[in-house]
Image (cartoon, rainbow, N blue to C red):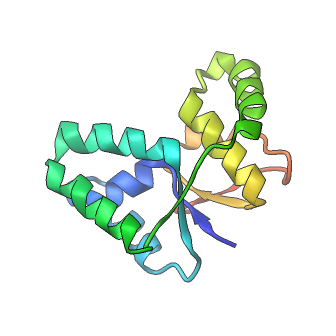
Amino acid sequence: MALILDTGPLYASLDRSDADHAACRALIEGSTEPLVTPAPVLVEVDALIHRHLHPGVLVALLDDINAGSYRVEDVAPSDYPRIRSLCDRYADLDIGFVDAAVLAIVECLGEPKLVTLDRRHFSVLRPRHVDALTLLPA
């Protein structure tokens, strides 16, 4: 089992001024499971860091990744049909590539939960392996 991190919680854990910082930081630091972030999430986190913080925060995150604190899960070529299907099926909700890729990776890893602040999208998305994801923080 792993704790899969979406963009919001990963960013919030890095930004002390974020309203969700304490909850996300506590969840991440208290996890006994490996921390996994889908690779597309890092692009969004990078953009947020550069918009709101300073580049040193990204360097520190990359140091943590290099040290093994986080495992980055890449999108496999076999994930793209599922990502396309999700983007099409949930087009009315404006599901983008990153959210679809996150769900595809959650499915591939067989995880029943996801750490996300995006309840608007992930409370509606239906994974193949469970009826609904458990969204954290609760």
Residue 119 vs residue 127, the one in the foreground: 127
Residue 37 left/right relative to 82: left
Residue at x-position 14% and y-position 48%: 54
Q: Is residue 125 visible?
A: no
Where is 114 relative to 34, above or below?
above
Give the percent coordinates (x, y) of residue 34. 56, 74
Q: Is residue 134 visible?
A: yes
Residue at x-position 47% and y-position 45%: 41
Residue 74 left/right relative to 12: right
Residue at x-position 30% and y-position 66%: 63
Residue 4 vs residue 136, the one in the foreground: 4
Where is 112 relative to 105, above or below?
below
Residue 19 vs residue 35, the one in the foreground: 35
Give the percent coordinates (x, y) of residue 66. 38, 68
Where is 123 relative to 138, above or below?
above
The C terminus appears in which quarter of the rendering? bottom right
Residue at x-position 71% and y-position 23%: 90
Give the percent coordinates (x, y) of residue 45. 36, 45
The N terminus appears in which quarter of the rendering? bottom right
Residue 42 left/right relative to 96: left
Give the percent coordinates (x, y) of residue 37. 52, 56
Residue 82 sits in which quadrant?
top right
Total residue callouts: 0
Residue 32 sits in which quadrant?
bottom right
